[in-house]
Image (cartoon, helix red, strand yellow):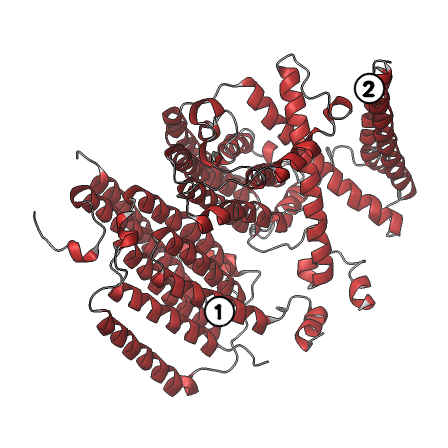
Amino acid sequence: MVEITTLHYLVVAAALFVLGVIGVLTRRNVVIVLMSIELILNAVNLNLVAFSRMWGNLHGQIFAIFIVVDAAAEAAAGLGILIAFFRNKETVNVDEIDLLKW
Amino acid sequence: MPNFIMSYLGSKVTPGEAGNQFWALIYVLIIFAGVAVAVLAMNWIERKALAHFQIRLGPMRVGPHGLLQPIADAVKLMLKEDIIPAEADQFVFWIAPLIGLLAAFTVYTVIPFGPSQAVSDMNIGILFMLGVSSLGVLGIVVSGWASNSHYPLIGALRSSAQMVSYEVAMGLAVVSAILMTSLNATGTGTLSMIGIVQAQQQQGVWFIFKFFPLGFLAFVIFAIAMIAETNRAPFDMAEAESELTAGYHTEYSGLRWSLFMLAEYAAMIAVSSIAVTLWLGGWMRPFPNLLHAPAWDFIFSLFPGLTFLGLAAITFVGVARMPSQSFFKIQRIGLAVFAAVLGFIALLLLVIAVAGRSADTSVAARFREGIDYVYWFVLKVAVFMYLFIWYRATWPRYRFDQLMKIGWKVMLPISLGVLIVTAIVGVIFS
Amino acid sequence: MNPAMNSAFNAGMAPVATPWFFYVLAGLAVASGVAVITRRNAVHAALALIVTLLSVAGLYLMLYAPFVAGVQIIVYAGGIMVLFLFVIMLVNIERSSKERRFNRIWPVGLVAACALMALFVSAIVKGKALFPDRGMPLPESSNTQQIATLLYGEAGRMGQYTFAFEIASLLLLVAILGAVIMTKKKI
């Protein structure tokens, strides 16, 4: 069997990134859009950790930890916005969230 | 192949570290069997102990003194009709107990029963345990949702909110115990479970007694948080039979409900193992430094055999006290057989303890050491299990807002304070 | 026995059956990723995302990053996904499970994503000469200690990322405050 190099991990990360981008661009449900954003962040993390292994130092892993922290904060804020919006308009459809003021 | 199997037998590391998949699999199977037996025993002990606390007898009919009751319960649950609510989400309904079971059982990979008696000694052992036990919350949330009925949903949301709140206090208490592992010559602590017990061994004190009362306070916080984590009394609002018609597992019947119960008991044993490893010295026998002579080693190595001998003696007393009608003849015989089995195990353990009494590396000595390590660990975990039952019998349950208030306003500040003071004291005394 | 297992048996600490584990974990991650973006039911998508997160944590373990794997399991799978499931239940999108899944302009999104994928593939193929063929070995047993040194510093000096660490904790505080204030009914 072929030995697993950094390239393999980069391909997996690219696939996850593209899947996340498709999810963000095409789904109508806001929660699923937020989950696709989490997919994108995970792909970036995988990329960073793979490169950290390649170069042999830990800077990539530290960056990955900070990205996880950032993703937690962003998920909390994004879901808070979603709940506040849902309380007013009773929908989670991206197409119907199109007014600045109602 | 036999070389692969036999080459592990003399080693001093866990199968995970030795890269030996065969023995890792054997250890996993032993752990499965052990947890299954422990859950059956817990079921019986819980019903009998609760009954005796409430001045009644508990199950007496099924076997002698109800000893076959757990088996009867298991058979009944397996034969019950499997009802799935009509509007429920089929796939999620099916997968929810499995998530809880997965989270509860994966933790057993890193529990150290001895210095090399663990499936694998991960470098991030305690981090892994905290993470995987927090996956159990997902099983509860998903099961409440999948039942498509409001009682389970409210119960699941309450239960998961409670578990998430007490996870914070639990994590901080664990961190203050990990801090104490770094008070050695190199100043480097360790996150691996075996390393934590070895740090206690090296520092010559159980962490519950270290920097008294800091270690004790951290232990108390963890003990309270672990009861809330496993949804046991007095924090069992989520599954309170009188308030919420059994909470998140209302709609589950038969085998699925038994999977939930299995996951709950397995999680109880897992968090008790964390408490024993971090604060109570894991597999070390009591007073390893104070009573250090080989004579004391020999006396303490007799304890496994003596415990089973005591259990066999109690069972024989039970046989003697059986009523003498012919109706009870089969029960008498059954109990006598059980007592004889216990006595046989006791005899075996005593023989191993006597044969392996020197500290050399003969087979008997290694067996004796292994049995001693596992025995002391299991004994301490069994004490915690009994405490769980005692708490359930003694204390009324907390109302949900009181529960959340305690989790956030009492436990979190105290655990933060303990952590800070432990760090300061550790720096001063290092 | 394949050579990987024999060398593990001799080496003791070397990883075992690495290609097999990589393909299983990577396949699971990508398959669950597809499930996340295609499921109609949001709870199914959340469960698929949990599987993705756990398999990515497994990939981190294979990349000699045990601490990041632990953080991923605790924070992402055990914290963020519980938050997502809570919000899905609060929002209770019964109606949306009967609606159309995808946007009206979904071909545009798909084309854009394919263009992005083509860009990635060309970058990886053209830049392949830059990547060393073997990863430099990272000592796994001191991973947590080295991360702690970078984050917290040692022997009286500040670590390289201590300032960033403090800012990250401030960010979390701001996120907590924001989430609480946004979801309160009366401020």
- Residue that label 1 marks: C27
Task: Find residue B303 and report its horizontal and vertical position in percent.
Answer: 81, 32
Specify the amino acid type for callout 2. Answer: Gly
Q: Is residue B54 above or below residue C30?
A: above
Q: Residue drawn 47% across and 58% down?
A: C54
Q: Is residue A100 above or below residue B274?
A: below
Element type where label 1 sits in the image: helix
* Residue B27 seen in render: yes
Task: Find residue B206 and report its horizontal and vertical position in percent.
Answer: 64, 36
Q: Is residue B20 above or below residue B27?
A: below
Circle 2 chain: B
Badge 1 density bin: few <14, some 14–19, many ≥20, Cα 10 Å = some
Q: Residue drawn 92% across and 42% down?
A: B355
Element type where label 2 sits in the image: helix
Badge 2 density bin: few <14, some 14–19, many ≥20, Cα 10 Å = some
- Residue that label 2 marks: B318
